[in-house]
Amino acid sequence: MMKKYFAPVALILGLTLGLAFAQNITKSIQLSQDPSGPIGFDSSNNSYFPKHINATGPSPAVGTCGTSPSVAGSDNAGKITTGSTATTACTLTFQTAFNTAPACVMATAVTNAGPTFVATTTTTATFNYASATSIVFSYVCMSVS
């Protein structure tokens, strides 16, 4: 009598365990039916942020950006001021490693900085640019997982 239930139960348990191991999410929030909260979600799981998204946390370390560079921000977003010695590259070392190498975008209002190029690993982002001193670059880094 019990044999006929063994295969379906084993299949369900196997699928459940397979799904459990495929997830990287370790925490979540419970959503309510009240649409007036600070973050909105629709039936397709799209997110809506009615105000600003603030990237908080400790600042990454900054190096190879000339003499006395500085950074204000977090691993996700911030501003780098290059040092007083001309350089062509700047490296951020993230405070917390990403699960996968993030995509980073860098921009500046200074026209002589030329195009910027970004190379990333899970622990660093290296920004390459035309030789410059004391320029402020803005950056945003996000990872897919």
Image (tube, grey):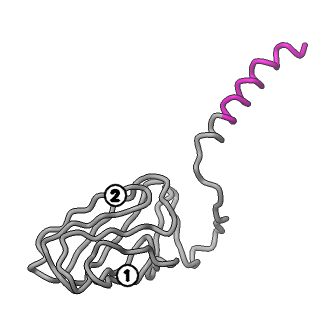
Q: Residues within 10 Å of mark 1 (few under 14, many from 20)?
A: some
* Residue at x 64%, y 61% (from the top left corner): 28
Magenta: main secondary structure: helix
Which residue shows up at 42% across the image and 80% down it?
Answer: 73
Vertical side of 85 occupied by 28: above or below? above
What's the residue type where badge 1 is placed? Val
Mark 2 highlights which residue?
120
Position in image of residue 105 (x %, y %): 28, 67
**Of callouts 2 and 1, the N-terminal one:** 1
In percent of width and height, residue 107 lies at: 23, 74
Region rendered in magenta: 1-17
Q: Is residue 93 left or right of residue 80?
A: right
Q: Is residue 118 magenta?
A: no
For badge 2, the amino acid type reads Thr
Q: Which residue occupies 37% across, 66% down?
A: 141
The local secondary structure at tag 2 comes to: strand
Q: Nearer the viewer, residue 31 or 24?
A: 24
Q: Is residue 6 magenta?
A: yes
Q: Position of residue 143 (x, y in %)?
A: 42, 58
Residue wearing tag 1: 71
